[in-house]
């Protein structure tokens, strides 16, 4: 089961984590970004946020376009769309890593050209 923040859509596996997270929406934000409307009540988060303006690195949701600063935040957000990260495109089973998902797809669904790289073993198996 997942617990979702009703303010920002971030998902959590544990209710106490969601409860702690909600505090960032309730507290007075004393640090404001000069380049966008981001505000934080934690100085270290403001530094982390500013780094993304400098580097230009963001992780965007392919469904709704929301941008995140960390890949982990994007993964959590994907649960709001009922999408499991690293899920098989054939049977929708979720995996802990992309590599495990690819092995599953090749082994179970005989998908030889996953990741746009042809598996040399597949050409040997086909007549």
Image (cartoon, helix red, strand yellow):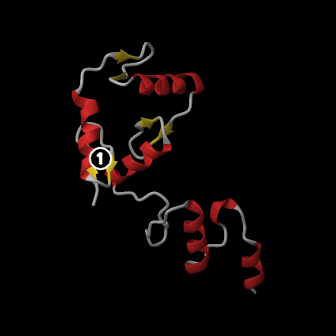
Badge 1 marks a residue whose secondary structure is: helix
- Residue 80 percent across, percent down from the top left: 32, 50
The quarter of the picture where residue 73 lies is top left
- Exactly how many numbered labels are in the figure? 1
Can residue 40 be seen? yes
| Residue ID for mark 1 | 17
- At 57% from the left and 22% from the top, the residue drawn is 54
In the displayed structure, 112 sits above or below 82; it is below
- Residue 85 percent across, percent down from the top left: 46, 57
Q: Is residue 121 left or right of residue 54?
A: right
- At 32% from the left and 50% from the top, the residue drawn is 12
Q: Quadrant of the N terminus?
A: bottom left
- Residue 47 percent across, percent down from the top left: 48, 23
In the displayed structure, 33 sits above or below 58; it is above
Q: In which quarter of the image is the C terminus?
A: bottom right
- At 44% from the left and 35% from the top, the residue drawn is 67
The quarter of the picture where residue 74 lies is top left
- At 23% from the left and 43% from the top, the residue drawn is 19
Q: In this view, does 61 lie to the left or right of 122?
A: left
The quarter of the picture where residue 8 lies is top left
Q: Which residue lies furthest to the top in this view?
A: 34
- Residue 52 percent across, percent down from the top left: 52, 27
């Amino acid at each position: 089961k997942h617990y979702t923040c009703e303010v920002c859509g971030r998902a959590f596996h544990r209710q106490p984590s969601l409860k702690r997270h909600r505090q960032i929406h309730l507290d007075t934000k004393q640090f404001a970004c000069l380049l966008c409307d981001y505000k934080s009540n934690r100085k270290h988060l403001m530094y982390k946020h500013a780094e993304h303006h400098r580097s230009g690195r963001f992780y965007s949701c392919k469904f709704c376009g929301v941008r995140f600063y960390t890949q982990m935040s994007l993964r959590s957000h994907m649960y709001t769309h009922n999408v499991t990260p690293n899920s098989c495109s054939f049977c929708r089973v979720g995996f802990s890593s992309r590599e495990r998902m690819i092995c599953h797809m090749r082994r179970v669904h005989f998908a030889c050209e996953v990741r746009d790289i042809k598996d040399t073993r597949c050409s040997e198996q086909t007549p």
